[in-house]
């Protein structure tokens, strides 16, 4: 019994020891990763650089590892840093030509081999001194973008000569120029946008803020931070992408209105002004003018002022002023001008505020809230009002007809002013002619031919 107890105790002690080692290992790893972000207070007045580096290490609780020949040990340093990170303190002490790599509780100092094309630094609120997290930092030429981390630190690959923009909800947008001679480490102060802070927030703005906090808590996608921080659209003359967010507009693709756009497979944008072509499809958050061609689909949330051509599917989320040509189906919510839908199977149109509307569908056309000038469907058509021609292989249905209905089987309308031709024709009120096997107008039913006059 005692022997079993000793074995059981030994096994438990072994497990406890392994767990303790794992915890210590994790703590050392986390500590190492945080060396450059530890906050310190230092004050140097004509202090030799070697002594200043030693003081930084002592304050931050780490050990140095570097070749003494790398630095000018006797160089005199004057610096006052209150609540600075180790990283920004070292950039001020040493300048641009060095890089730092944590290893355990050591910080390795090396010479940078070549000028970096990477910009880095901190974003701060000058009023509070707090670092600003989740601010969007992007190159205005390439639209490469990143966000600041929990310490307000960012790293961004930039062109040799460009403009960098910084945006954050409730702060003023800040833009600065970068040249080949510019420092690669940039600390930027963002000023609070008092116009946004003092006015009563709308429901949409409150929702944006709530989304932002949720994003911060759950560490969700970069794109939604960009949407919150960069509320206005950007403009580019052209862009090329392979997939959404994988192209010349990078993670800001959904915020950009492009003149000319090529999406090798698929792409997303705020809008398109002249031409957009997608091998598979195009996602457009707002409006399109000109021509949009998708190998399979075009998904547009705003207005179409031009032509949409989709191998299978076209969708206009708001107003169609132009033409949709879809291999299978076209959908538009409304039209107030010329609107033409040509679908291999079906067309759907929500409502009209006037204008000329034409639907040609291989099987069916639906416009239950619209006045349509021409509907031609292989099987069935339905519209609120026809002011022209409605022709179907089987069935036509409309509330009001001012023109012609022609169907292989049945035409039905509440009010008819014109001509119905079909096997069965039905109207509540008739001012015109019905030609078919059975013709009904009101309570009257006649074979072959029926007519009605204005009451």
Image (cartoon, helix red, strand yellow):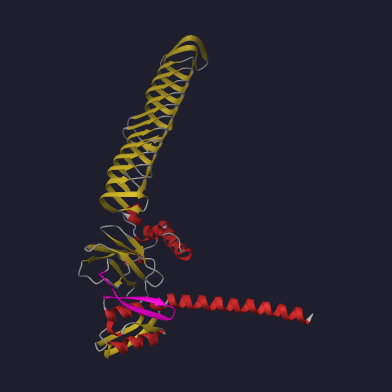
Q: Specify the segment rendered in magenta.
A: 96-115
Question: Residue 182: where, in percent of width, then height?
Answer: 22, 70
Image quadrant assignment for residue 129: bottom left
Residue 273 vertical placement versus 167 (above, below):
above
Instruction: Report the front residue among 396 and 443.
Output: 396
Residue at 25% x, 62% y: name it.
Answer: 159
Count the marks: how many? 0
Residue at 30% x, 78% y: name it.
Answer: 91
The majority secondary structure of the magenta stretch comes to strand
Task: Assign the N terminus to one quadrant of the image.
Answer: bottom right
Task: Assign the C terminus to one quadrant of the image.
Answer: top left
Instruction: Report the front residue among 411 and 252.
Output: 252
Q: Is residue 32 visible?
A: yes
Q: Is residue 455 visible?
A: no
Asked if residue 106 lies in the magenta stretch, the reply is yes
Question: Residue 108: where, in percent of width, then height?
Answer: 36, 79
Question: Residue 26: where, in percent of width, then height?
Answer: 51, 75
Residue 20 vertical placement versus 132 (above, below):
below
């Amino acid at each position: 019994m005692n022997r079993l107890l000793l074995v059981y105790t030994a096994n438990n002690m072994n497990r406890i020891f392994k767990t303790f080692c794992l915890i210590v290992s994790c703590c050392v790893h986390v500590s190492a990763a945080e060396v450059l972000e530890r906050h310190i207070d230092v004050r140097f007045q004509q202090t030799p650089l070697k002594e200043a580096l030693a003081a930084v290490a002592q304050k931050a609780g780490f050990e140095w590892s570097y070749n003494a020949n790398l630095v000018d040990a006797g160089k005199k340093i004057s610096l006052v840093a209150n609540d600075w990170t180790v990283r920004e303190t070292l950039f001020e002490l040493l300048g641009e030509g060095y890089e730092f790599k944590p290893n355990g509780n050591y910080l390795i100092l090396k010479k940078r081999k070549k000028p970096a094309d990477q910009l880095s630094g901190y974003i701060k609120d000058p009023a509070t001194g707090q670092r600003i997290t989740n601010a969007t930092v992007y190159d205005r030429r390439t639209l490469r973008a990143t966000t600041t981390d929990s310490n307000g630190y960012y790293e961004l690959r930039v062109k040799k000569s460009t403009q960098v923009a910084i945006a954050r909800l409730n702060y003023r947008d800040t833009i600065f120029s970068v040249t080949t001679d510019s420092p690669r480490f940039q600390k930027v102060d963002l000023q609070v946008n008092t116009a946004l802070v003092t006015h009563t927030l709308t429901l949409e703005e409150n929702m944006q803020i709530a989304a932002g906090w949720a994003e911060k808590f759950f560490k969700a996608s970069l794109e939604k931070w960009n949407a919150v921080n960069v509320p206005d659209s950007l403009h580019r003359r052209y862009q090329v992408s392979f997939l959404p967010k994988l192209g010349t507009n990078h993670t800001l693709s959904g915020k950009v209105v492009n003149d000319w756009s090529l999406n090798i497979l698929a792409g997303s944008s705020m809008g398109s002004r002249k031409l957009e072509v997608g091998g598979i499809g195009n996602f457009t958050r707002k409006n399109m003018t000109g021509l949009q061609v998708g190998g399979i689909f075009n998904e547009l949330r705003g207005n179409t002022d031009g032509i949409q051509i989709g191998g299978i599917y076209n969708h206009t989320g708001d107003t169609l002023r132009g033409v949709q040509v879809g291999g299978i189906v076209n959908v538009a919510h409304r039209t107030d001008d010329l609107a033409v839908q040509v679908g291999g199977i079906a067309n759907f149109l929500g409502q009209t505020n006037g204008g000329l509307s034409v639907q040609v569908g291989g099987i069916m056309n639906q416009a239950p809230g619209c006045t349509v000038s021409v509907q031609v469907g292989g099987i069935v058509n339905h519209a609120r009002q026809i002011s022209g021609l409605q022709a179907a292989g089987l069935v036509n249905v409309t509330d009001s007809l001012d023109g012609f209905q022609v169907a292989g089987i049945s035409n039905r309308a509440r009010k008819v002013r014109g001509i119905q031709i079909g096997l069965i024709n039905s109207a509540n009120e008739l001012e015109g002619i019905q030609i078919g096997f059975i013709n009904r107008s009101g309570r009257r039913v006649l074979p072959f031919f029926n007519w009605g006059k204005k009451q």
